């Protein structure tokens, strides 16, 4: 198994933020906020250039699979996290629980879902459809989940302001990209690898800024190695709970082998891209965004590792 280079880049970025947090501070001469916002809008503009309306229309036929994946992504995940809320009794526990809820409310990731489904010989067109539509649904659903539980004394959670920011930052660039597909589709095909690298660089920039703020404010001073192990254990439990439930439902609905693979792979993923973008919009500058992103980044690394192993095993099973 190869270690994902993006995971290594995330670790290096966090280390950089620890030793040089001043670059991400409010007094920094480098306008990271402006760069990050512009970069996010460009990510979704290029996403719109690549998004195929024809594939989305044709993908509507396999509606049972899509319902299972989106229900898992936006309902099953949050309900499992909500079931743990009665057991939270401390303020520190509330903060960690909120970070888990944020993770649970996010849409599915695009690239890794499609790649892993392809390796495992699953339904690739359905994976592309679900991964693409999930990001659009998340723009509406994720803020609604967070509005219910973000402490009112922490921030004035105004959905009108949030949706306005999401429309300007995400929806409009996507719509513009779709409108310009006639002129830009060849560009996205030609520079596919470079655009992927650009996406990752923007995400790393947002991660650096979030963790730089958290290190400056000593947000992680109370977190030790044992706490990280506990968080990782809960993330693994969350992942496998969803993975097994989705697998059970897929079998009960008599999904084909390909559709079951797609349901389990797409229905258990969470998007680091959307997580970092949404954290910038949903939470104010005074909120410990680094703490909110910590479970998401651990989950990102874990989901790639586990699904890679499963996909490789399924691939061998098909080829033999």
Image (cartoon, rainbow, N blue to C red):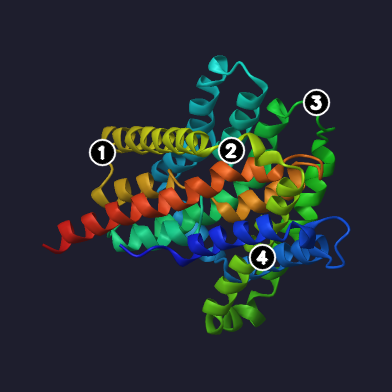
Please, what secondary structure does the residue beneath circle 4 have? helix
Question: Which quadrant holds the C terminus?
Answer: bottom left
The mark that comes first in sequence, 1 or 4, is 4
The mark that comes first in sequence, 2 or 1, is 2
Tag on residue 105? Answer: 2
User: Which residue is at a point 82% across and 33% down the rendered structure image?
Assistant: 155
Q: Is residue 147 above or below residue 287?
A: above
Q: Nearer the viewer, mark 1 or mark 4?
A: 4
Q: Quadrant of residue 263?
A: top left
> Separation of disc 2 and disc 1 at Cα?
27 Å
> Separation of disc 4 and disc 3 at Cα?
30 Å
The mark that comes first in sequence, 4 or 3, is 3
Judging depth in this view, the residue of 97 and 123 nearest the camera is: 97
CB within 8 Å, label 3 to label 2: no
Please, what secondary structure does the residue beneath circle 2 have? helix
List the residue tagged with mark 3. 152
């Amino acid at each position: 198994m190869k270690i994902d280079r993006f995971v290594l880049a995330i670790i290096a970025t966090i280390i950089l933020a620890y030793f040089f947090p001043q670059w991400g501070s409010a007094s920094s001469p480098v306008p990271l906020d402006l760069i990050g916002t512009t970069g996010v809008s460009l990510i979704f503009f290029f996403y719109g250039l690549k998004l195929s309306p024809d594939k989305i229309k044709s993908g509507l036929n396999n509606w049972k699979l899509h319902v299972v994946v989106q229900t898992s992504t936006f309902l099953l995940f949050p309900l499992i996290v909500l079931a743990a809320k009665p057991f939270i009794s401390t303020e520190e526990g509330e903060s960690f629980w909120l970070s888990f809820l944020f993770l649970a409310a996010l849409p599915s990731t695009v690239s890794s879902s499609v790649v892993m489904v392809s390796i495992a010989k699953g339904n690739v067109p359905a994976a592309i459809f679900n991964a693409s539509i999930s990001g659009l649904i998340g723009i509406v659903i994720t803020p609604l989940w967070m509005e219910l539980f973000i402490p009112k004394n922490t921030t004035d959670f105004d959905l009108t302001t949030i949706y306005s920011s999401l429309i300007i930052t995400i929806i409009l660039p996507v719509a513009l990209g779709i409108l310009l597909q006639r002129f830009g589709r060849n560009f996205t095909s030609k520079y596919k690898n470079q655009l992927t690298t650009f996406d990752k660089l923007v995400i790393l920039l947002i991660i650096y800024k979030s963790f730089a703020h958290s290190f400056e404010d000593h947000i992680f001073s109370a977190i030790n190695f044992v706490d990280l192990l506990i968080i990782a254990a809960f993330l693994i439990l969350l992942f496998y709970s969803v993975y097994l439930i989705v697998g059970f439902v897929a079998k009960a609905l008599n999904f084909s082998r390909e559709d079951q693979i797609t349901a389990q792979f797409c229905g258990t993923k969470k998007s680091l891209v959307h997580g970092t973008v949404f954290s910038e919009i949903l939470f104010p500058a005074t909120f410990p965004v680094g703490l909110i992103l910590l479970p998401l980044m651990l989950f990102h690394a874990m989901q790639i590792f586990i699904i890679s192993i499963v996909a490789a095993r399924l691939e061998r099973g098909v080829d033999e």
